[in-house]
């Protein structure tokens, strides 16, 4: 994908406006709505299992202090409650663009093993707010497709010193000049979390390469109606 291609449309934690976030159901639904793929969060359990969840605590349990089975049991046996990274890769590696966000340090080797074992075939990048995680992933395997996340201007300042192909700023940090600088550096710009049609079209007009949204149905409808992605 280059800056002249169609805009990549991704669900934020799946189709979280319509289903529980970071679940297989939310991921399935996002693809049904017509997006190219989705972003999801990965944390590490006590037994070093890569699980899909955003918060450090799940059902009042600390993710890093409990095993995968203990965390699963806290859902009372409900299906689709807590997928692991292998589950997501097995199910979607052939059909979806995957944005894997690493939330914590110390699980870089597990991420590399999983991605190498089941390589996403429709494109992917691994992102983090933690510079050390991105650098460690690059050191472990410099062929990995990586991205740097930024929610503040202070975080954004380091984008051109980080390894990786993607720069992922929050939409309020965007400007045409920034996107031009990202493209001039040979990188791609993906922004989040864009949930209003006018803003979706505005950031597209700025030249972003991808948009992450909570509302996958609205995202696809907006671009279909505008004829932006053909």
Image (cartoon, rainbow, N blue to C red):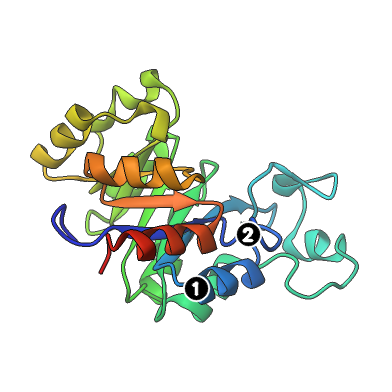
Q: Position of residue 104 (x, y in %)?
A: 55, 42
Q: Position of residue 144 (x, y in %)?
A: 28, 58
Q: CA distance from mark 2 to mark 1?
A: 14 Å
**Extreme residue in the right direction:** 76
**Left or right: residue 79 compared with residue 212:** right
User: To which quarter of the image does residue 135 belong?
Assistant: top left
Q: Nearer the viewer, residue 23 or 114?
A: 23
Front tag of 2 and 1: 1
Identify the residue at image location x=33%, y=26%. 156
Identify the residue at image location x=53%, y=68%. 30
Q: Position of residue 198 (x, y in %)?
A: 41, 42
Q: Establish if 84 lies above or below 180.
A: below
Q: Establish if 171 lies above or below 109.
A: above
* Quarter of the image that includes the C terminus: bottom left
The answer to whether one can see residue 128 in this image is: yes
**Left or right: residue 72 compared with residue 172:** right
The answer to whether one can see residue 163 in this image is: no
**Extreme residue in the left direction:** 184
Callout 2 environment at 10 Å: few (<14), some (14 to 19), or many (20+)? Answer: many
Mark 2 vs mark 1: which is more N-terminal? 2
Residue 133: assigned label:
none
Q: Establish if 201 lies above or below 218.
A: above
Identify the residue at image location x=32%, y=73%. 122
Identify the residue at image location x=25%, y=43%. 205
Name the residue that disc number 2 marks: 22
Label 2 secondary element: loop
**Left or right: residue 2 compared with residue 141:** left
* Quarter of the image that includes the N terminus: bottom left
Name the residue that disc number 1 marks: 31
Label 1 secondary element: helix
């Amino acid at each position: 994908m280059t800056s002249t291609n169609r805009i990549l449309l991704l669900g934020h934690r799946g189709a979280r406006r319509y289903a529980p976030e970071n679940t297989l159901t939310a991921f399935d639904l996002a693809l049904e709505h017509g997006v190219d793929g989705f972003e999801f969060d990965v944390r590490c359990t006590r037994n070093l299992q890569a699980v899909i969840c955003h918060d450090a605590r799940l059902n009042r349990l600390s993710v890093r202090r409990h095993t995968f089975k203990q965390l699963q049991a806290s859902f009372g046996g409900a299906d689709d409650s807590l997928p692991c990274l292998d589950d997501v890769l097995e199910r979607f590696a052939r059909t979806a663009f995957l944005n894997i966000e690493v939330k914590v340090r110390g699980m870089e080797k597990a991420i590399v093993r999983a991605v190498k074992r089941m390589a996403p075939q429709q494109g992917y990048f691994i992102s983090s707010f933690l510079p050390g995680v991105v650098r460690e992933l690059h050191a472990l395997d410099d062929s990995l497709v990586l991205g740097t996340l930024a929610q503040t201007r202070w975080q954004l300042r380091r984008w051109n010193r980080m390894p990786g192909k993607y720069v992922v700023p929050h939409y309020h940090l965007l400007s045409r000049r920034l996107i031009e600088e990202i493209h001039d550096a040979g990188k791609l710009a993906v922004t989040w979390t864009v949930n209003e049609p006018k803003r979706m079209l505005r950031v597209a007009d700025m030249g972003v390469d991808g948009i992450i949204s909570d509302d996958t149905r609205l995202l696809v409808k907006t671009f279909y109606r505008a004829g932006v992605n053909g």
